[in-house]
Amino acid sequence: MKFPPGLPIDDIKFLCSILAKKGESRLVGGCVRNILLSKTSTDIDIATQVEPKQAMQLLTKEGVKCIPTGIKHGTFTVIYHKQHYEITTLRRDVETFGRHAEVAFTNDWLEDAKRRDFTMNAMYIDMDGNLYDYFKGQQDLAQKLIRFVGDPEARIHEDYLRILRYFRFYSYFDGNNMDDASLNACKKLAANMDKLSGERIQLEMFKIINAKFAMDALALMHKNSILKVLGLDIQSDGFWGYNLGDDSIVNLAALLRCCAKPADTLAYIKLRWKLANKTFALLDFLVHLPFTANDAKQHQLRLLYQHGLEKYLGGVKLLAAETTALPADELISRATNAVIPKFPLSGDDMLKIGYSGKAMGVAIKLLEKAWLESDFKLSKSSLLAQAKHKLNKF
Ligand code: ATP
Ligand code: MG
Protein backbone atom coordinates (compact mmCIF):
# COMPACT_ATOMS: atom_id res chain seq x y z
CA MET A 1 0.00 0.00 0.00
CA LYS A 2 1.35 3.45 -0.87
CA PHE A 3 0.98 6.21 1.70
CA PRO A 4 -0.61 9.35 0.19
CA PRO A 5 1.64 12.46 0.08
CA GLY A 6 -0.27 14.51 2.71
CA LEU A 7 -0.04 11.81 5.43
CA PRO A 8 2.66 12.60 8.05
CA ILE A 9 3.97 9.07 7.70
CA ASP A 10 7.47 9.88 9.01
CA ASP A 11 5.96 11.20 12.25
CA ILE A 12 3.63 8.19 12.47
CA LYS A 13 6.59 5.83 11.99
CA PHE A 14 8.53 7.74 14.64
CA LEU A 15 5.70 7.43 17.19
CA CYS A 16 5.18 3.74 16.41
CA SER A 17 8.92 3.06 16.64
CA ILE A 18 8.88 4.36 20.22
CA LEU A 19 6.05 1.96 21.05
CA ALA A 20 7.74 -0.89 19.16
CA LYS A 21 9.83 -1.67 22.26
CA LYS A 22 6.69 -3.22 23.78
CA GLY A 23 4.50 -4.14 20.82
CA GLU A 24 3.34 -3.44 17.30
CA SER A 25 1.20 -0.49 16.20
CA ARG A 26 -0.82 -0.05 13.02
CA LEU A 27 -3.01 2.60 11.41
CA VAL A 28 -6.74 1.91 11.64
CA GLY A 29 -10.14 3.52 10.96
CA GLY A 30 -10.70 6.56 8.77
CA CYS A 31 -7.10 7.02 7.71
CA VAL A 32 -6.92 3.42 6.43
CA ARG A 33 -10.07 4.01 4.37
CA ASN A 34 -8.52 7.21 3.08
CA ILE A 35 -5.20 5.59 2.19
CA LEU A 36 -7.13 3.00 0.16
CA LEU A 37 -8.98 5.85 -1.56
CA SER A 38 -5.72 7.86 -2.02
CA LYS A 39 -7.04 10.67 0.15
CA THR A 40 -5.38 12.47 3.05
CA SER A 41 -6.79 12.44 6.59
CA THR A 42 -7.06 15.03 9.30
CA ASP A 43 -7.98 12.43 11.94
CA ILE A 44 -5.45 9.69 12.49
CA ASP A 45 -6.23 6.60 14.57
CA ILE A 46 -3.52 4.19 15.63
CA ALA A 47 -4.13 0.76 17.18
CA THR A 48 -1.39 -0.65 19.37
CA GLN A 49 -0.57 -3.83 21.25
CA VAL A 50 1.01 -1.76 24.00
CA GLU A 51 -1.16 -1.15 27.07
CA PRO A 52 -2.28 2.47 27.43
CA LYS A 53 -0.34 3.50 30.55
CA GLN A 54 2.85 1.96 29.29
CA ALA A 55 2.37 3.49 25.83
CA MET A 56 1.90 6.94 27.39
CA GLN A 57 5.00 6.47 29.53
CA LEU A 58 7.14 5.43 26.56
CA LEU A 59 6.03 8.41 24.46
CA THR A 60 6.21 10.96 27.29
CA LYS A 61 9.77 9.83 28.02
CA GLU A 62 10.67 10.80 24.46
CA GLY A 63 9.11 14.25 24.94
CA VAL A 64 5.88 13.47 23.05
CA LYS A 65 2.80 15.18 24.46
CA CYS A 66 0.12 12.68 25.57
CA ILE A 67 -3.36 13.47 26.90
CA PRO A 68 -5.31 10.69 28.69
CA THR A 69 -8.58 11.45 26.83
CA GLY A 70 -10.22 8.04 27.25
CA ILE A 71 -7.62 6.14 29.18
CA LYS A 72 -10.22 3.98 30.98
CA HIS A 73 -11.29 2.59 27.60
CA GLY A 74 -7.75 2.29 26.36
CA THR A 75 -7.47 5.51 24.32
CA PHE A 76 -5.21 8.51 24.66
CA THR A 77 -4.40 11.41 22.38
CA VAL A 78 -0.97 12.39 21.17
CA ILE A 79 -0.21 15.83 19.82
CA TYR A 80 2.91 15.78 17.71
CA HIS A 81 3.90 18.52 15.25
CA LYS A 82 0.40 19.97 15.78
CA GLN A 83 -1.27 16.77 14.51
CA HIS A 84 -3.60 14.82 16.81
CA TYR A 85 -3.33 11.04 16.97
CA GLU A 86 -5.84 8.83 18.79
CA ILE A 87 -3.93 5.83 20.09
CA THR A 88 -6.00 2.87 21.26
CA THR A 89 -4.82 -0.40 22.73
CA LEU A 90 -6.18 -3.56 21.08
CA ARG A 91 -9.29 -4.69 22.93
CA ARG A 92 -11.83 -7.40 23.12
CA ASP A 93 -15.24 -6.96 24.68
CA VAL A 94 -15.82 -8.85 27.90
CA GLU A 95 -19.36 -7.62 28.34
CA THR A 96 -21.41 -4.93 26.63
CA PHE A 97 -24.23 -2.77 27.98
CA GLY A 98 -25.75 -1.04 24.97
CA ARG A 99 -23.22 1.79 25.06
CA HIS A 100 -20.54 1.09 27.62
CA ALA A 101 -18.54 -2.05 27.35
CA GLU A 102 -16.27 -3.76 29.78
CA VAL A 103 -13.12 -4.33 27.77
CA ALA A 104 -9.93 -6.31 28.19
CA PHE A 105 -6.69 -5.50 26.43
CA THR A 106 -5.29 -8.05 24.03
CA ASN A 107 -2.38 -8.64 21.68
CA ASP A 108 -4.60 -10.23 19.08
CA TRP A 109 -5.37 -8.14 16.00
CA LEU A 110 -8.26 -10.35 14.90
CA GLU A 111 -9.94 -10.05 18.33
CA ASP A 112 -9.64 -6.28 18.07
CA ALA A 113 -10.99 -6.28 14.50
CA LYS A 114 -14.03 -8.31 15.59
CA ARG A 115 -15.22 -5.61 17.98
CA ARG A 116 -14.97 -2.81 15.41
CA ASP A 117 -18.22 -1.70 13.86
CA PHE A 118 -18.01 -1.99 10.06
CA THR A 119 -15.90 -4.11 7.75
CA MET A 120 -14.31 -1.01 6.19
CA ASN A 121 -13.35 0.18 9.69
CA ALA A 122 -11.78 -3.11 10.72
CA MET A 123 -8.72 -2.84 8.49
CA TYR A 124 -5.18 -2.00 9.57
CA ILE A 125 -2.06 -0.83 7.75
CA ASP A 126 1.34 -1.43 9.32
CA MET A 127 4.39 0.80 9.03
CA ASP A 128 5.60 -1.08 5.93
CA GLY A 129 2.32 -0.41 4.17
CA ASN A 130 0.89 -3.95 4.54
CA LEU A 131 -2.90 -4.11 4.71
CA TYR A 132 -4.66 -6.43 7.18
CA ASP A 133 -8.24 -6.92 6.12
CA TYR A 134 -10.15 -9.50 8.16
CA PHE A 135 -13.71 -9.13 6.84
CA LYS A 136 -13.45 -8.11 3.16
CA GLY A 137 -13.41 -4.43 4.12
CA GLN A 138 -11.43 -3.41 1.05
CA GLN A 139 -14.00 -4.98 -1.23
CA ASP A 140 -16.86 -3.33 0.68
CA LEU A 141 -15.11 0.04 0.61
CA ALA A 142 -14.68 -0.22 -3.18
CA GLN A 143 -18.40 -0.97 -3.45
CA LYS A 144 -19.34 1.73 -0.91
CA LEU A 145 -21.06 -0.92 1.15
CA ILE A 146 -21.42 -0.18 4.88
CA ARG A 147 -21.60 -3.60 6.45
CA PHE A 148 -21.45 -4.58 10.11
CA VAL A 149 -18.74 -6.94 11.25
CA GLY A 150 -20.67 -10.03 12.36
CA ASP A 151 -24.41 -10.14 12.97
CA PRO A 152 -25.82 -6.60 12.63
CA GLU A 153 -28.51 -6.93 15.29
CA ALA A 154 -26.13 -8.42 17.82
CA ARG A 155 -23.56 -5.70 17.11
CA ILE A 156 -26.16 -2.96 17.53
CA HIS A 157 -27.38 -4.41 20.82
CA GLU A 158 -23.80 -4.11 22.07
CA ASP A 159 -23.77 -0.38 21.33
CA TYR A 160 -26.75 1.57 20.00
CA LEU A 161 -24.51 4.40 18.85
CA ARG A 162 -23.63 2.15 15.93
CA ILE A 163 -27.03 2.93 14.39
CA LEU A 164 -25.97 6.56 13.97
CA ARG A 165 -22.45 5.55 12.98
CA TYR A 166 -23.95 3.49 10.16
CA PHE A 167 -25.50 6.67 8.71
CA ARG A 168 -22.34 8.67 9.39
CA PHE A 169 -20.34 6.36 7.14
CA TYR A 170 -23.18 6.29 4.63
CA SER A 171 -22.96 10.12 4.46
CA TYR A 172 -19.28 9.93 3.46
CA PHE A 173 -20.02 8.35 0.05
CA ASP A 174 -22.38 8.84 -2.82
CA GLY A 175 -23.89 6.05 -4.87
CA ASN A 176 -23.73 3.64 -1.95
CA ASN A 177 -24.64 0.01 -2.30
CA MET A 178 -26.89 -1.30 0.40
CA ASP A 179 -26.33 -4.14 2.80
CA ASP A 180 -29.97 -4.88 3.58
CA ALA A 181 -29.22 -6.81 6.76
CA SER A 182 -27.28 -3.84 8.20
CA LEU A 183 -29.90 -1.25 7.27
CA ASN A 184 -32.82 -3.40 8.45
CA ALA A 185 -31.14 -3.96 11.81
CA CYS A 186 -30.68 -0.18 12.23
CA LYS A 187 -34.32 0.37 11.42
CA LYS A 188 -35.58 -2.41 13.66
CA LEU A 189 -33.57 -1.31 16.69
CA ALA A 190 -33.83 2.47 16.23
CA ALA A 191 -36.06 2.98 19.28
CA ASN A 192 -33.13 1.90 21.46
CA MET A 193 -31.40 5.17 20.65
CA ASP A 194 -33.38 6.54 23.61
CA LYS A 195 -30.59 5.00 25.70
CA LEU A 196 -27.93 7.22 24.10
CA SER A 197 -26.68 10.35 25.77
CA GLY A 198 -27.60 13.69 24.23
CA GLU A 199 -23.96 14.59 23.68
CA ARG A 200 -23.33 11.47 21.59
CA ILE A 201 -26.47 11.99 19.50
CA GLN A 202 -25.49 15.60 18.90
CA LEU A 203 -21.93 14.72 17.93
CA GLU A 204 -22.95 12.03 15.45
CA MET A 205 -25.83 14.05 14.00
CA PHE A 206 -23.60 17.05 13.38
CA LYS A 207 -21.06 14.78 11.68
CA ILE A 208 -23.78 13.37 9.41
CA ILE A 209 -25.33 16.75 8.67
CA ASN A 210 -21.94 18.20 7.83
CA ALA A 211 -20.74 15.37 5.58
CA LYS A 212 -20.30 15.61 1.85
CA PHE A 213 -23.30 13.41 1.11
CA ALA A 214 -25.43 14.48 4.08
CA MET A 215 -28.57 14.68 1.99
CA ASP A 216 -28.32 11.04 0.89
CA ALA A 217 -27.85 9.87 4.47
CA LEU A 218 -30.64 12.08 5.80
CA ALA A 219 -33.01 10.84 3.09
CA LEU A 220 -32.23 7.25 4.05
CA MET A 221 -32.71 8.06 7.74
CA HIS A 222 -36.02 9.73 6.95
CA LYS A 223 -37.25 6.86 4.81
CA ASN A 224 -36.46 4.42 7.60
CA SER A 225 -38.04 6.56 10.36
CA ILE A 226 -34.70 7.12 12.09
CA LEU A 227 -35.05 10.92 11.99
CA LYS A 228 -38.48 10.64 13.55
CA VAL A 229 -37.09 8.66 16.47
CA LEU A 230 -34.61 11.49 16.99
CA GLY A 231 -37.44 14.05 17.06
CA LEU A 232 -36.92 15.37 13.52
CA ASP A 233 -40.28 15.10 11.83
CA ILE A 234 -39.68 16.44 8.31
CA GLN A 235 -42.93 17.47 6.65
CA SER A 236 -41.87 19.59 3.72
CA ASP A 237 -40.53 17.68 0.75
CA GLY A 238 -38.83 20.89 -0.37
CA PHE A 239 -35.97 19.94 1.96
CA TRP A 240 -34.77 17.17 -0.34
CA GLY A 241 -34.07 19.74 -3.07
CA TYR A 242 -31.95 21.95 -0.81
CA ASN A 243 -28.36 22.66 -1.59
CA LEU A 244 -26.73 22.01 1.81
CA GLY A 245 -23.31 23.56 2.41
CA ASP A 246 -20.56 22.82 4.90
CA ASP A 247 -22.01 24.53 7.97
CA SER A 248 -23.71 21.96 10.18
CA ILE A 249 -25.72 24.48 12.22
CA VAL A 250 -27.08 26.10 9.06
CA ASN A 251 -27.92 22.69 7.61
CA LEU A 252 -29.72 21.69 10.80
CA ALA A 253 -31.66 24.98 10.73
CA ALA A 254 -32.72 24.26 7.14
CA LEU A 255 -33.94 20.84 8.23
CA LEU A 256 -35.78 22.24 11.26
CA ARG A 257 -37.56 24.78 9.08
CA CYS A 258 -38.99 21.83 7.12
CA CYS A 259 -40.35 20.11 10.24
CA ALA A 260 -44.05 20.39 11.12
CA LYS A 261 -43.39 22.62 14.13
CA PRO A 262 -39.87 24.05 13.84
CA ALA A 263 -39.84 25.97 17.14
CA ASP A 264 -41.16 22.99 19.12
CA THR A 265 -38.72 20.63 17.44
CA LEU A 266 -35.84 22.96 18.22
CA ALA A 267 -36.96 23.20 21.86
CA TYR A 268 -37.09 19.39 22.01
CA ILE A 269 -33.66 18.79 20.53
CA LYS A 270 -32.14 21.53 22.70
CA LEU A 271 -32.96 19.35 25.69
CA ARG A 272 -32.54 15.90 24.13
CA TRP A 273 -29.32 16.61 22.23
CA LYS A 274 -28.03 18.85 25.03
CA LEU A 275 -27.29 21.75 22.69
CA ALA A 276 -25.00 24.44 24.06
CA ASN A 277 -26.72 27.79 24.67
CA LYS A 278 -24.70 29.41 21.91
CA THR A 279 -25.65 26.73 19.37
CA PHE A 280 -29.28 26.98 20.42
CA ALA A 281 -29.28 30.79 20.13
CA LEU A 282 -27.92 30.63 16.58
CA LEU A 283 -30.38 27.89 15.58
CA ASP A 284 -33.23 29.85 17.15
CA PHE A 285 -32.27 32.92 15.13
CA LEU A 286 -31.98 30.92 11.90
CA VAL A 287 -35.22 29.00 12.41
CA HIS A 288 -37.05 32.34 12.74
CA LEU A 289 -34.79 34.14 10.27
CA PRO A 290 -35.97 37.78 10.27
CA PHE A 291 -34.73 38.67 6.80
CA THR A 292 -35.07 37.45 3.24
CA ALA A 293 -32.71 37.35 0.27
CA ASN A 294 -31.59 40.84 -0.72
CA ASP A 295 -28.20 41.75 -2.06
CA ALA A 296 -28.43 45.57 -1.79
CA LYS A 297 -25.34 46.95 -0.06
CA GLN A 298 -27.12 49.21 2.44
CA HIS A 299 -29.60 46.46 3.32
CA GLN A 300 -26.67 44.20 4.08
CA LEU A 301 -24.99 46.79 6.32
CA ARG A 302 -28.22 47.32 8.22
CA LEU A 303 -28.56 43.58 8.86
CA LEU A 304 -24.93 43.35 9.91
CA TYR A 305 -25.44 46.22 12.34
CA GLN A 306 -28.62 44.68 13.76
CA HIS A 307 -27.61 41.04 14.04
CA GLY A 308 -23.82 40.86 13.92
CA LEU A 309 -21.59 39.00 11.45
CA GLU A 310 -22.14 35.41 12.67
CA LYS A 311 -25.93 35.50 12.49
CA TYR A 312 -25.91 37.40 9.22
CA LEU A 313 -23.57 34.87 7.60
CA GLY A 314 -25.67 31.99 8.93
CA GLY A 315 -28.77 33.61 7.45
CA VAL A 316 -27.17 34.08 4.04
CA LYS A 317 -25.95 30.48 3.97
CA LEU A 318 -29.40 29.28 5.00
CA LEU A 319 -31.12 31.27 2.27
CA ALA A 320 -28.55 30.04 -0.23
CA ALA A 321 -29.26 26.43 0.78
CA GLU A 322 -32.98 27.02 0.36
CA THR A 323 -32.83 28.97 -2.92
CA THR A 324 -30.08 28.98 -5.49
CA ALA A 325 -30.88 32.52 -6.70
CA LEU A 326 -28.72 34.27 -4.08
CA PRO A 327 -25.14 35.41 -4.88
CA ALA A 328 -24.09 33.93 -1.55
CA ASP A 329 -20.32 33.87 -2.08
CA GLU A 330 -20.29 37.54 -2.99
CA LEU A 331 -22.50 38.48 -0.02
CA ILE A 332 -20.35 36.47 2.36
CA SER A 333 -17.07 37.99 1.19
CA ARG A 334 -18.58 41.49 1.20
CA ALA A 335 -19.95 41.00 4.71
CA THR A 336 -16.69 39.56 6.03
CA ASN A 337 -14.81 42.62 4.79
CA ALA A 338 -17.48 45.18 5.70
CA VAL A 339 -16.83 47.89 8.26
CA ILE A 340 -19.96 47.83 10.39
CA PRO A 341 -20.99 51.46 11.19
CA LYS A 342 -21.01 52.58 14.82
CA PHE A 343 -23.92 54.59 16.19
CA PRO A 344 -22.47 58.10 16.60
CA LEU A 345 -24.22 59.05 19.87
CA SER A 346 -23.14 57.79 23.28
CA GLY A 347 -24.86 57.90 26.64
CA ASP A 348 -22.41 60.63 27.65
CA ASP A 349 -23.48 62.80 24.70
CA MET A 350 -27.09 62.44 25.81
CA LEU A 351 -26.31 63.22 29.47
CA LYS A 352 -24.54 66.40 28.43
CA ILE A 353 -27.64 67.75 26.74
CA GLY A 354 -29.87 66.96 29.70
CA TYR A 355 -31.15 63.39 29.22
CA SER A 356 -31.24 60.83 32.01
CA GLY A 357 -32.90 57.58 33.09
CA LYS A 358 -35.61 55.87 31.11
CA ALA A 359 -36.19 58.84 28.78
CA MET A 360 -32.59 58.54 27.62
CA GLY A 361 -33.04 54.86 26.72
CA VAL A 362 -36.22 55.55 24.77
CA ALA A 363 -34.68 58.52 22.94
CA ILE A 364 -31.54 56.58 21.97
CA LYS A 365 -33.69 53.79 20.52
CA LEU A 366 -35.70 56.26 18.41
CA LEU A 367 -32.61 58.09 17.21
CA GLU A 368 -30.88 54.84 16.35
CA LYS A 369 -33.93 53.80 14.30
CA ALA A 370 -33.87 57.09 12.39
CA TRP A 371 -30.12 56.69 11.82
CA LEU A 372 -30.61 53.13 10.50
CA GLU A 373 -33.42 54.27 8.21
CA SER A 374 -31.18 57.01 6.85
CA ASP A 375 -28.73 54.22 5.95
CA PHE A 376 -26.28 55.54 8.55
CA LYS A 377 -26.18 58.93 6.87
CA LEU A 378 -27.49 61.08 9.74
CA SER A 379 -24.46 62.76 11.28
CA LYS A 380 -23.69 63.10 14.96
CA SER A 381 -24.56 66.82 14.91
CA SER A 382 -27.95 66.31 13.27
CA LEU A 383 -28.73 63.45 15.68
CA LEU A 384 -27.82 65.71 18.60
CA ALA A 385 -30.00 68.47 17.18
CA GLN A 386 -32.93 66.02 16.97
CA ALA A 387 -32.22 64.84 20.50
CA LYS A 388 -32.28 68.42 21.83
CA HIS A 389 -35.46 69.11 19.95
CA LYS A 390 -37.16 66.06 21.45
CA LEU A 391 -35.88 66.64 24.99
CA ASN A 392 -38.94 68.38 26.39
CA LYS A 393 -41.26 65.79 24.82
CA PHE A 394 -40.04 63.05 27.17
P1 ATP B 1 -13.70 9.33 10.79
O1 ATP B 1 -12.96 9.51 9.52
O2 ATP B 1 -15.07 9.94 10.77
O3 ATP B 1 -12.93 9.69 12.03
P2 ATP B 1 -13.32 6.65 11.74
O4 ATP B 1 -13.58 5.32 11.11
O5 ATP B 1 -11.89 6.97 12.01
O6 ATP B 1 -14.00 7.75 10.83
P3 ATP B 1 -13.78 7.06 14.55
O7 ATP B 1 -15.05 7.45 15.23
O8 ATP B 1 -12.63 7.98 14.59
O9 ATP B 1 -14.17 6.69 13.05
O10 ATP B 1 -13.35 5.66 15.17
C1 ATP B 1 -12.13 5.02 14.80
C2 ATP B 1 -12.34 3.53 14.66
O11 ATP B 1 -12.71 2.98 15.94
C3 ATP B 1 -13.48 3.15 13.71
O12 ATP B 1 -13.02 3.07 12.38
C4 ATP B 1 -13.88 1.80 14.27
O13 ATP B 1 -13.00 0.80 13.87
C5 ATP B 1 -13.69 1.98 15.77
N1 ATP B 1 -14.92 2.41 16.48
C6 ATP B 1 -15.20 3.65 16.93
N2 ATP B 1 -16.38 3.69 17.56
C7 ATP B 1 -16.88 2.45 17.54
C8 ATP B 1 -18.06 1.82 18.03
N3 ATP B 1 -18.98 2.54 18.68
N4 ATP B 1 -18.20 0.50 17.83
C9 ATP B 1 -17.26 -0.22 17.18
N5 ATP B 1 -16.13 0.31 16.68
C10 ATP B 1 -15.93 1.61 16.85
MG1 MG C 1 -11.21 8.71 13.11
Image (cartoon, rainbow, N blue to C red):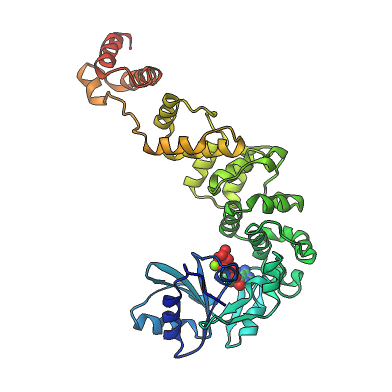
Q: Quadrant of residue 191?
A: bottom right
Q: Residue at x 54, y 28 (%)?
A: 292
Q: Residue at x 41, y 35 (%)?
A: 334
User: For this rendering, which residue is in front, 59 or 293?
Assistant: 293
Q: Residue at x 42, y 77 (%)?
A: 10
Tell whether 186 sits left or right of 283.
Answer: right
Q: Quadrant of ligand 1?
A: bottom right
> Which residue is at the far bottom?
21
Quadrant where the N terminus sits is bottom right
Q: Is residue 94 visible?
A: no
Residue 363: where, in percent of width, then height? 34, 18
Tell whether 66 sits left or right of 132.
Answer: left
Quadrant where the C terminus sits is top left
Residue 244: where, in percent of width, then height? 60, 45
Residue 101: where, in percent of width, then height? 62, 74
Q: Is residue 277 above or below residue 335?
A: below
Q: Is residue 26 above or below residue 261?
A: below
Q: Is residue 129 above or below residue 303?
A: below
Tell whether 115 sits left or right of 52.
Answer: right
User: For this rendering, which residue is in front, 167 or 391?
Assistant: 167
User: For this rendering, which residue is in front, 294 or 23?
Assistant: 294
Residue 366: where, in percent of width, then height? 37, 18
User: For this rendering, which residue is in front, 1 or 74?
Assistant: 1
Q: Quadrant of residue 257?
A: top right
Q: Is residue 305 visible?
A: yes
> Which residue is at the far left?
352
Tell whether 327 sits left or right of 100.
Answer: left
